[in-house]
Amino acid sequence: MRSAEEPGERPATFEACYAEHRDAVYRLCLRYGAGRASFAEDVTQETFVRLYQSFAKLDRERPISDWLYAVASRLCISRLRRDRSMLGWLARLVHRGEEPAPSAAQLYEHHEAAAGLMEAIGRLPPRQRVALCMKAIDGKSQKEIARILRVSEGYVSQLIARARQALTDMGWENVE
Amino acid sequence: MTNRDFKRAILEVRADFAKVEMPAAAASRVWRRIARPAPRLPRAQVAWLAVAAAGAGALAAAFALHGHRARPVVSLPDGFEVVAGSEPGGLVRAGGAGEVVAGGAPATLHVRAWGRVTLHAGARLRRAPDGVELVGGDADFEVDKRPPGAATFVHLAGGSIEITGTRFSVETRLGGGAVRLDEGAIRFHAPDGRTVALAPGQVLRWPLPAAAEPVPPPGATSASERRDRPPRADPARPIAARSVDDISDADAVVDRIAVLRAAGRYGDLADELRLAASHARRPLTRERLSFELGEVLSFHLPDGARACAHWADHVRAFPAGHYADEVSEARRILGCDTKGDGR
């Protein structure tokens, strides 16, 4: 997510924040959700509900984009975990056909490698998936990822190493 | 390089996602859910709730079969109790610092020796030494009749409401809100010391508009000079009843409109916007109000034909408008051109 906002330049109203940051939050959720539009929409909504609840209390000196990135990332992990549970399966069954979510192949129509990679990343466990996306796609350092996910740097290192190994096992090359 | 080259694929992913924007329809849906008093639960939560509800139902049946007396679903802070027959008490919970928090549906509470409060979804309330404090959210109040001189208060983030026995509704938003008086009398006290009395049927919005001019010290002007001044706009009057020229720009109108929008009163909202636009003299104000009206007709009221007709008028009135992209997107979503509403 971009951090164009300088400290102290947070939009004055919640509505302005939503207008400015919704695309970035949606993009992030779409990445972590392996291109599922319904997933991205739900987590974007939940992220902005959290922002609404905390808006008045947030530190005005820190860019709100950082806060949104961290909250959206953690919500994505929670949601991905829930989706893998039996209840997640039940929810998908109940809502099947409700929304035409594009497949990864549709999203990356002209980029076969990208489509294949996102499908592979979609098979990783939630934390590995999010940590790897943060590192490889968003360019975050292990220290930043640890702070955002509220885990130790050592654990982040393990998550990324396991994710890379899994991708290598799936036949991916140059996974560094 | 092959199609399984990780580095190349990452570059493609970055390039693809850089172009992605949240679809306008999704952005509008999410905004509506956030702005509504009861945001929709994400789909997975619905399943959790379905299972929880089934479990609660089974428990309730088991209790009934064994002849247990019904017990309160929640333990609320002292002085609060859920009124029987209101929405399920399980949707009200005790928050921190003596707060009562409404869950996903409105719930009516009896506040001991004070009155009744209907908390809308997410609203938070607590007792105060001289009344109650609405910490956040929307609520309707019915305060018990009080003896003369025994005023009580509803404290808010942006002021206080002094009550003498009445029925009124409060909607709070970030940095402001509105109160509508149904019966009785209330006075709103702003943090800067200004006080506004409301009569039944009036709506007051806060923060109060900035004073048009500094209040002169007593004796600084003559009585005749004061008489010659135009009267100030009464902030208690609904904005639609005033000319938009009373205020410096459309922002205050849009604030008032936000209250109607948050309450889901889109029909009233459209009427308010149309009226305000007809009173506006400045082209920029008219354009903004017209755009807001188009948004409401397009995404909140199920009237695509009316929305398309409005957008056609809008484009004619503001051919190089500030919202050209958004208008174009709305018309595309509604299929205005294919319906022949392009005029």
Image (cartoon, grey):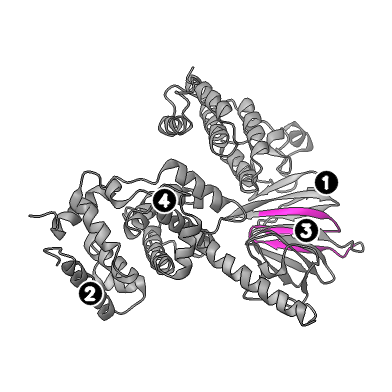
Compute the Cα span from label 3 to label 2.
57 Å
Q: Is residue B207 above or below residue A55?
A: above
Residue situated in front as seen by the camera: A9 or A141: A141
| Residue A28 shown left or right of residue B143 in the figure | left
In the rendered image, which residue does mark 2 sit on?
A162
Residue drawn at point x = 74 percent, y = 79 percent = B63
* Same chain assignment for discs 3 and 2: no
SS assignment at label 2: helix
Name the chief secondary structure element in magenta: strand
- Badge 2: how crowded within 10 Å, few (<14), some, or many (20+)? some
Q: Are marks 3 and 1 in contact (CB under 8 Å)?
A: no
Q: Where is residue B36 in the image (x, y as percent from the top left)?
A: 60, 51
Q: Is residue B300 above or below residue A176?
A: above
Residue drawn at point x = 48 percent, y = 55 percent = A45
Image quadrant in which you'd find residue B280: top right
In the rendered image, which residue does mark 1 sit on?
B200
| Disc number placed over residue B141 in the picture, else none | 3
Image mark 1: chain: B
- Under mark 4, the amino acid is Arg
* Among numbered discs 2 and 4, the one appearing first in the sequence: 4
Q: Where is residue A47 in the image (x, y as percent from the top left)?
A: 46, 60
Compute the Cα span from label 1 to label 4.
40 Å
Q: Which of marks 3 and 2 is in front?
A: 2
What residue span does the magenta drawing correspond to?
B149-171
Q: Which of marks 3 and 1 is in front?
A: 3
Which residue is most to the front? B65
* Same chain assignment for discs 2 and 1: no
Count of number-bearing discs: 4
- Badge 1: how crowded within 10 Å, few (<14), some, or many (20+)? some
SS assignment at label 4: helix
Compute the Cα span from label 3 to label 1.
14 Å
Compute the Cα span from label 2 to label 1.
67 Å
